[in-house]
Amino acid sequence: MLQRPSPEVVQYLDRAAEARDRAQNAPDRVARDHYERMEHMWMTLAASAAFVERVDLFLETVGRALPPCDVCSTCVRLMRLSVLETSRYRRRYSFECGRCGDVRDRELLL
């Protein structure tokens, strides 16, 4: 299952594309630099929002009866929990992507 980006992330990516178009059509170097900086900032915001959504997904599943899950950064599919290690002060989750085999660890301090 491919995860779709949220409307917010799509909006940020659209704004970055608009800034790129404006940079390409800028009349002078100053305007071009401005729009290139704007494109970079919109792309950074989109990446940050997508990351926060992934962390929220992880934290939301940890507190429920559902097994925790994460999203693979390589193929953007849900990863399954493969190992859970617990101690008095922390929990370490290891996730594995069933499609590409990517592995990711997450740790929660209790």
Image (cartoon, helix red, strand yellow):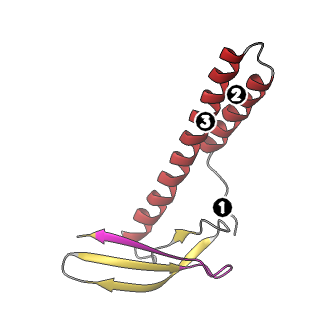
Residue 77 in percent (x, y) is at 64, 69
Side (left or right) of 85 relative to 19: left
Q: Amino acid at mark 1?
A: Gln
Task: Please identify the quarter of the rendering in which residue 29 is found.
Answer: top right
Q: How many marks?
A: 3
Q: Nearer the viewer, residue 57 or 43?
A: 43
Residue 107 in percent (x, y) is at 35, 71
Q: Callout 2 environment at 10 Å: few (<14), some (14 to 19), or many (20+)?
A: many
Separation of residues labelled 3 and 1 (CA atoms): 24 Å
Q: Which residue is mark 2?
A: 19
Q: Residue at x 59, y 77 (%)?
A: 102
Q: Callout 1 environment at 10 Å: few (<14), some (14 to 19), or many (20+)?
A: few
Question: Dot 1 lies on which element?
Answer: loop
Q: Which mark is residue 40?
A: 3
Q: Which mark is residue 3?
A: 1
Residue 38 in percent (x, y) is at 61, 28
Range shown magenta: 96-108
Tell me which label, 3 or 1, sits earlier in the chain: 1
Question: Dot 3 lies on which element?
Answer: helix
Residue 1 among those drawn in magenta: no
Q: Amino acid at mark 2?
A: Ala
Is there CB contact under 8 Å for labels 3 and 1?
Answer: no
Residue 55 in percent (x, y) is at 45, 59
